[in-house]
Amino acid sequence: MQFAHDPEILMQLEEDEGIWFGKHKQEVLVSVRPEVALYFKQRHLFPEQSIEQEDAAGTLLIRCQIRHEMQLLPLVRFWIPYIKIIQPAHFQQKMEQDLQQYLLPVV
């Protein structure tokens, strides 16, 4: 018996930017403060990043598509305090819980 490659999976592997695999993508909205907005304008730091809005103060609203939270959370941690997850709210809540846990004293 010969193994047959699934053409849909092969195409996904060739087209995706990252190492995370899955059929379902999740849309995420992120707010970026003006102090670091230039970095997000110069290159895409998030998967499938697009700038949806820039207000008069220079704050960006960025939309991206992720397959796994690890495509998002480490980048957000790196850019604290200049970035915040707007939607879905559960990612921002997880980020805040992780930071609270980190701040607990070591026993």
Image (spheres, rainbow, N blue to C red):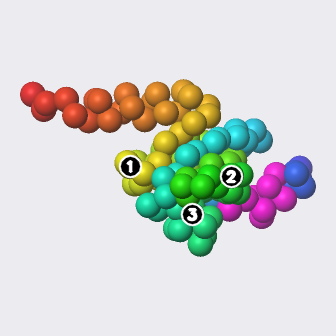
Marks 2 and 1 close (CB-CB < 8 Å): no
The residue nearer to you, when weighing 77 against 68, is 77
* Foreground label between 3 and 2: 2
Of helix, strand and loop, which one carries label 3? helix
Q: Which residue is mark 3?
A: 40
In the image: residue 62, left or right of residue 81:
right
Name the residue located 77 percent from the left edge and 41 percent from the top edge.
23
The residue nearer to you, when weighing 31 against 5, is 31
Q: Which residue is mark 1?
A: 80
Packing grade of label 1 (10 A; few <14, some 14-19, many >=20) is few
Q: Is residue 11 magenta?
A: yes
Q: Which residue is mark 2?
A: 53
Q: Amino acid at mark 1?
A: Ile
Whether 88 is drawn above or below 9: the answer is above
Sequence-wise, the earlier of marks 2 and 1 is 2
Estimate the x, y position of residue 17 in percent, counting from the top left.
68, 62
Q: Which part of the image, by quadrant, shows the C terminus?
A: top left
Whether 58 is drawn above or below 76: the answer is below
Name the residue located 60 percent from the left edge and 67 percent from the top edge.
41
In the image: residue 106, left or right of residue 89:
left
